[in-house]
Image: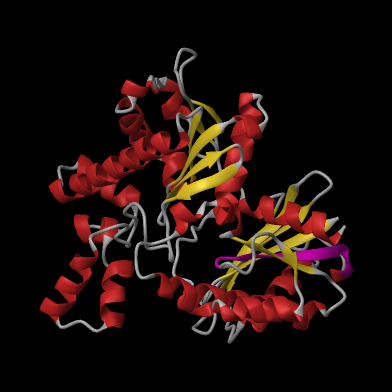
Amino acid sequence: MKILVINAGSSSMKYQLIDMKDESVLAKGNCERIGVDGHFKHTTGDGRTYETDVVMNNHTEAFVQIKNALIDEQYGVIKELSEVSAIGHRIVQGGALFSESTIVTEEVIKGIESLIPLAPLHNAAHVQGIKACLEVFGKDVPEVVVFDTAFHSTMPQKAFMYPVPYEYYEKYAVRRYGFHGTSHRYVSQRCAELMGKDIKDTKIITCHLGNGSSITAIDGGKVIDTSMGLTPLDGIMMGTRTGSLDPSVVTFIAEKEHFSPSEMDTVLNKKSGFLGISGVSSDDRDVSSAAADGNTRAQLAIDMLEYEILKYIGSYTAVLGGVDAIVFTAGIGENQYSHRENVCHNLAYMGVKIDDEVNKKAIRGVEGKISTPDSSVEVFVIPTNEELVIARDTMELVK
């Protein structure tokens, strides 16, 4: 069975074609700048690459590019589209409507559309992606939606509720949802496998650290708390997002600068975090390089990030009543060994010990344990694979 995994953004559409026989990636690529000037890149599993600038006015036109590339004589990986058995879509916000992956129907599409106010850019784009696939493949090819929020649906009410008037929860579904669920789900399950344990017998803290970051407490395979909230703005500081802060900071700055809600939203989501503190970049690599050159604001940004990761791990250890393993994943978590080193050395009071040399080698896709044999808590670097989770869920449902 071959499954096409789609991750549609507001102006992009990423994809992977996965052969579920051995879970190998046959091809992957990205349609970028949809509705602007357009750029398309397609890479096969054996290394053939096709790249071009092409105008794509909407997601349907983008999907045509994907279809043509998959069956292209020179760069294709299948002979005809009928080889694609099903399509799996990543959906950011499932709200309280969707607690598990599901097959696409008209009702499901309407449900995802109803949640657009909770994730305006993401969910609207996901709906466009689903409809584009329907236009190109027709209704005979089953489509499945896998929600970022679903893995977090096991959180108890005491963890997901906000202490604002209860009527806002009833009227507008204001609560903590959490994101990066497919990533946290994959790496926690993989962590249990590497530990040689049933996930039901584990307490794991997973740190998904990238341009967007979230940390999750998982007890027996079920999420009991996570750092992102109603939106992906909450939690630790990120590339351009603030993370958690005193709400009065928002009203104070808005009043002083005469910002509209929209302008304030731009400050919080696009001008803060690493970019706002360092003044250098939103990219951890650029900020780390600047800090190494003596830039004090860049170093401050790094210090703040590591401090916040440390705080979340500490608080989640308390919530879990102890922790068996800590996992680092995503772009920063997988590749920035110095952050892992600094965080873990500050967890020595918990009995955490890592092998610094092993830790330095655990980059660029390397998976494995970086803690020492006598560490009280096992520490892992596990490259995330959200596409594989989506493909597996899709296969199970269409079977």
- Relative to 297, 230 lies left or right: right
Q: Nearer the viewer, residue 167 or 240?
A: 167
Query: Is 88 part of what is drawn in magenta?
Result: yes
Residue drawn at (30%, 31%) of the image: 342
Magenta segment boundaries in residue numbering: 82-93
Please provide percent x and percent y for residue 40: 59, 71
Query: Is 281 part of what is drawn in magenta?
Result: no
Q: Is residue 196 above or below residue 148?
A: above
Residue 127 occupies quadrant: bottom right
Please provide percent x and percent y for residue 117: 48, 79
- Relative to 386, 224 lies left or right: left
Question: Seen from this angle, which residue lies furthest front?
Answer: 166
Q: Is residue 72 visible?
A: no
- Relative to 346, 326 lies left or right: right
User: Is most of the magenta stretch helix, strand or loop?
Assistant: strand
Question: Seen from this angle, which residue lies furthest top?
Answer: 374
Q: Nearer the viewer, residue 107 or 23?
A: 107
Please provide percent x and percent y for residue 121: 49, 76
Considering the image in quadrants, where does the C terminus appear?
A: bottom right
Residue drawn at (68%, 51%) of the image: 389
Q: Is residue 116 visible?
A: yes
Q: Nearer the viewer, residue 5 or 207?
A: 207
Considering the image in quadrants, where does the N terminus appear?
A: bottom right
Q: Is residue 346 above or below residue 272?
A: above
Residue drawn at (11%, 77%) of the image: 256
What colouring does the structure picture have?
A: secondary structure
Please provide percent x and percent y for residue 207: 45, 43
